[in-house]
Amino acid sequence: MSTYILKRLAISVVVLFALAAASFLLIHLVPGDPVRQMLGSGATPENIASVRSDLGLDRPMIDQFGTFMGNTFTGQFGDSITLRTPIGDLISERIGPSVLLILYGVFFALIIGVPLAVAAALRPQGFADNVIRIATTFTFAMPTFWLGLVLALIFGLQLGIFPVSGYETGVGGFFRTLTLPALTLGLSLVAMVVRTLRTQLLVVLGSEHIEAARARGLTERRVVGVHAIRNSIMTTITVISVQIGFLIGGTVVLEYVFQIPGMGTLLIDAVTNRDFPLVATITVLAGATVIVVSLITDLIQLALDPRVRLADS
Amino acid sequence: MTALALVMRRPFTARSSLHLNLTVKIGAVIVGLIVLAAFLAPIIAPYPPNEAKFLDQLQAPSFQHLMGTDSAGRDVFSRTLYGARVDILVMLFVTFVPLPIGVLAGAMAGYFGGWVDLVISRLADLMIAFPFLVLVMAIIAIVGPGLKGVMIGIPLAGWALYARMARAEMLVVKEQNYMVATKTLGYSRKRAIFRHAAPSILRTSLVYSTLDMIVNLLLIAGLSYLGLGMQPPGSELGTIIANGQVHLLDAWWISTLPGLVLVALGVGLGLIGDGLSDGDLLGKEAR
Amino acid sequence: MRKLGYSVSALFAVIAAGFALAACGGGSSSSTGDTAIPKEALGNAATTIGECSADPKSGGTLVYSRRAQAQDLNPLVVSGGNGDIFVVNQIFDQLVTSNPDGGFELTPAIAESWDISDDGKTYTFHIRKGIKFSNGQPVTAEDVKFSLDRFADPKLNLILAVAAVGYEKSVVVDPQTVRVELSEPVAAFLYNISIYPASIVPKDLVLEQGDAFWDAPVGTGPFMVKKFTRGSSLTFAKNPHYWEEGKPYLDTVKFNFAEEDNSRMLDLKSGKAQMVDGVPYSQIPSVLDDDQLQLQVVEVPQFLGLWLNHQRPQMADEKVRQAMQYALNRDEIDTAIYRGVGSTPNSVLPRLKFDAPAGEVEPYPYDVEKAQTTIAESKYPDGFDITLKYPAGFEDYKQLGLYLQQAWEQIGITVKLQELDQAAVADAFYAGDYDMTFPYAQFTSDVTVPDEYANLLNDPGSGTDGFFSWWHDEPIWKKVKEFTTTIDEDTRAEQWPVIQQEMLDTSPVINVLNLPFVNAHREGVCGSKVDALGSDQLQDTWLTSAE
């Protein structure tokens, strides 16, 4: 077991390394000179050359690559070209809102999704099941940039319950400013939660374990509410964690629509400015998050489902 | 998608042939109607899709313009029909090109294990972990702007999920009694895979592909929103929605009505997917 | 010509320069032709009607949702384009400044007065008595010299070192007087030092604090930075030592960065913000319809500059370019896409000081027949295929692209549209990898005089190759050189219309339309002026709700 975990960890590091290398190389294929973007057309060629050399952008690509990899794996990250600020500082400023948005979004997905899934699973193919299915697919198939604006229009402008956009810190600020974007994110995720949990519930409800509980004379409510959900929720969380890439992508758009100073807007600005070190660092961090979450998920599965262990060893 | 795969892992046998329940039928009708309308676009569309008449701009829906007109005075209904055509084709391409590749790669990884598994699985991890936006931008930098970037970028990342799913499926199938039985019966390994594992894996993948198609539709739309999709003046649903979005406050119909078509297509596909995955579970319940 | 802060879906930023024809008091902007919107609705400056005609009240907080975010508060860096420039302008002053009430003329700021030697090579500035930085320390001649030397140092002034052309040195005459010596007469010198890179900063603090100074800079402007949350907002507090008696009126100003057009308009409509900039053209009618909102249209030298690459033989053909001019129905473009706020240009550059009126230099009329006969005289009577690159995410450019495609189809030119992200468009522009392009999402002059753009477009050297058009016309270039070194304003006023006419005739590039800045504010906001450079004059802004 521990060798398996060690092996898995080692492999993750290799993937992370490949990811960093791929980010660096791909980003340098994208046209656009960061210095030119920064200085505009009023800059003389001498200006541009001197800034390039100050930033070390005139060094051979292989050197720059070495520096980037070194920086990334020592956690130094270097400086942003456009903002002339350590990338580490920028990220620590911006990561909070994004993480909160994702967690709050998942929370919405669960509190909306779990009851719906239970209702659907109690009577498969029943009326409620079909309505829930259609409704959740509906929110799932809606572009988030559009859904977000519609929610801002309704709750922000018409009802005036929440501000239409912006970000405030503190507990009150958190609920005021992140509720609408998190709800949007949650709604796009609800379909996934309902589908997985419902299917899983049907499997569990049909299992011997539940038959036994029923046989012991427990009420159907108790069977579903306690035993079935307990057995199914882990799978659902696993499914959500696999969606971490989707969630990160979703926050980029939502931060933009709701003007939240998070990692997504930072990435958009960095791409716009062709701030290569910043783009590469965010790319690596986003990738690393996916890898780490997937590692944890695998380990949980390993603990829960011995068949995976069997098959892997 | 591992968990989804776990959920849907019952083998697909001749006994439980496609259980065409009501859900699938409704889904098929919705998707069928949209596909039909899209492919009859040259006959149905009342106006040429790219004909700009600036004097007729931003007209609300009426009998002349069922979905109104956009900011260049183009008929949104006609553009939606032609746009749906592009979307359906691109969606099919970006979903069904990576599907067999991913399934094959994943099945191989699962069956052979060892270094084959190591290479394929880590490559899949890498593709899943890599931020998609950066990937597509880099591809567009190489091949030039337009849908080409999307059509290369999505499959490049898309195969990985199928591979993961097929691998997990294969691992489970491999351990099941009837696979062990095929060995004792003296069947060859290839035959074993072909006869038993493949249909089950394919089924899971196809069910998932209905979800994947929706995700891809949204991705195409999202990339258009970022100016990384179809080049003007062509029409594509995502482009129409994204362009109309700036008019959400003054001309709601431009993005809302084509948006509803997109959502309807998504719901239709979702219903088909649900129906396909459910048929089996219902069969089990009915046991 | 600062590049703009740009972002994915929407437009932003505002660059600088312009002339606000209407002064505070609600004069109407005049130059637009027949438009869809009644002219009286399009005034710069706050209404004087109702509550705003009362005496200004002090106090209160103004929330201003802005398209371009600020990135860097150092006026010599301003990597965020206009987002930075308009913030820097709240914090700092220059020796002289554009008239806060609008118009092309300059007014005293940190310098109370100045003398110019007869040869135009020596400027003596007298510093305003009692003027202090926001930390209370007096502005000295040393500070001015230090700031101007920085402005002229190409290693420090990365973005607009060209503005310091001719600067030789500054000499401290006494604590209140600075003498600036030029190596050659520069007609636009005062204009060049009236903009952000020539901001006056406290020497001792900048030297002492180094880069850290720019995190919380100290200047003489009406406001100082209270809190800067990158990517989200910037809060200003009133500068208690501001030199204009009784100003600024507002205690606090909060800039909310909202690049997304709809988000910004929702901020305004919901009352979260009292002011917004960059009102999307399509939403102009809805702002006009809303009793709670006031539209503010400010004439600035912003234009739809369509750049043509003269390395392409088709674009180098004068007849082709003229035919393209004749084929444009600018009234229709203005009405259909810009809701009538634009105006037909009679120059290839944006509207600038010394421009002759339309009666003297005639704009190209819309004349399809003339366009067809003109192209028939070119080397391409049967037309050709060509690509137009423009920045993605801008609704007006999408429409404009379609419009131009239709217009030029009439003369056999088939335009292929290519939408690229802003950085890619700019990169292709600088590399000459384009046929036709709108290189900047918002294209404006940094100064109100034509010197900057005339020089750039005509100068084949300086590494910018005729402003990346690769166009060159030696006789016009000679005239431009003479114009930019002539000190006498009356002579310049005679020289420029000749150059204007000749450039328009040959049309090395095409000005499709002159465009204003379109801002809006809620009722109860008074004195929301914008100067000739498009910069908000928030020292004059006040709220009727203030206690």
Image (spheres, coloured by chain):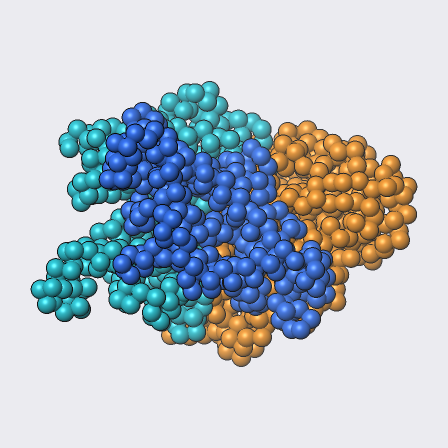
Chain colours: A cyan, B blue, C orange
**Residue C358, picture quadrant:** bottom right
Give coordinates of residue B106: x percent, y percent.
37, 35
* Total count of labels: 0
**Residue A204, picture quadrant:** bottom left
Give coordinates of residue C99: x percent, y percent.
59, 57
Picture quarter with the N terminus of chain A: top left
Relative height, residue C536 to residue C349 (above, below)? below
Q: Can residue C229 be seen?
A: no
Point out the residue furthest to the left here: A216
Q: Can residue C189 be seen?
A: yes
Relative height, residue C23 to residue B113 (above, below)? below
Q: Is residue A281 left or right of residue B262?
A: left
Nearest the camera: B72 or C238?
A: B72
Point out the residue furthest to the bottom here: C50
Q: Residue at x 40, y 52 (%)?
A: B17
Nearest the camera: C420 or A227?
A: A227
Q: Residue at x 37, y 30 (%)?
A: B190
Give coordinates of residue C407: x percent, y percent.
77, 53
Nearest the camera: B233 or A115?
A: A115
Q: Is residue A128 left or right of residue B267?
A: left
Relative height, residue C176 to residue A47 (above, below)? below
Give coordinates of residue A20: x percent, y percent.
37, 31
Point out the residue furthest to the front here: B185
**Residue B61, picture quadrant:** bottom right
Q: Residue at x 72, y 65 (%)?
A: B55
Q: Residue at x 69, y 53 (%)?
A: C402
Nearest the camera: C272 or C449?
A: C272
Q: Is residue A249 left or right of residue C50?
A: left
Picture quarter with the C terminus of chain A: top left
Q: Is residue C196 left or right of residue C404?
A: left
